[in-house]
Amino acid sequence: CSLCIWQRWPHLVAMALALVAMVLPWSVVMLAGAAAVATSGVIGVYHTGVERGWWPGPTACSGAVDLSRLTAEEMLDRILAAPVVRCDEVAWQMSGLSMASWNAILSFALAAIWLMALRRA
């Protein structure tokens, strides 16, 4: 699902920051890393809301699409290009929380840890 992929990009940014930590000031790396994982947490909250039906998700992977004005060929093209996994369905859950929910919780926890480490420095 595209929202699942969106949640991973900020973690990749945080890992890239770890690679350049030798040339940037430590405080900049910690702040940017915390912001990156918090961004993943925000996307996780958004994705959780889509899964729970609290708000609509991207039409590319959730919700209904108006097909009334499309030709049969255009409809077939859309069907073949559609994602296999829908963003508005919970694919897996543990303790009643989806992967998106767990990502949000753990991302915000990691951001808090990084900010506490920055305060101690």
Image: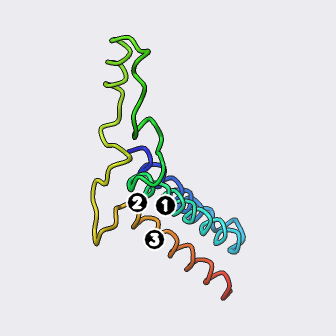
Above or below, 51 relative to 102: above
| Residue with the mark numbered 1 | 45
How far apart are the alpha carbons under marks 3 and 2?
Answer: 9 Å
Which is more N-terminal, label 2 or label 3?
2
Quadrant occupied by the C terminus = bottom right
Which is more N-terminal, label 3 or label 1?
1
**Are the two marked residues, 1 and 3, in contact with CB atoms closer than 8 angstroms?**
no
| Residue with the mark numbered 2 | 100
Say which amino acid is labelled 1.
Val
Above or below, 116 relative to 95: below
| Residue with the mark numbered 3 | 105
Task: Using a 10 Å C-alpha cutoff, classify the residue at mark 2 as few (fewer than 14 neighbours), some (14 to 19) or many (20 or more).
Answer: many
Which is more N-terminal, label 1 or label 2?
1
Q: Residue at x 40, y 39 (%)?
A: 63
Residue 27, how many percent across, how many down?
70, 74
Task: Using a 10 Å C-alpha cutoff, classify the residue at mark 1 as few (fewer than 14 neighbours), some (14 to 19) or many (20 or more).
Answer: some
Q: Horizontally, is 105 left or right of 17 in the view?
A: left
Q: Which of the two residues, 119 or 19, is positioned nearer the viewer here?
A: 119
Q: Residue at x 35, y 36 (%)?
A: 83
Task: Using a 10 Å C-alpha cutoff, classify the residue at mark 3 as few (fewer than 14 neighbours), some (14 to 19) or many (20 or more).
Answer: some
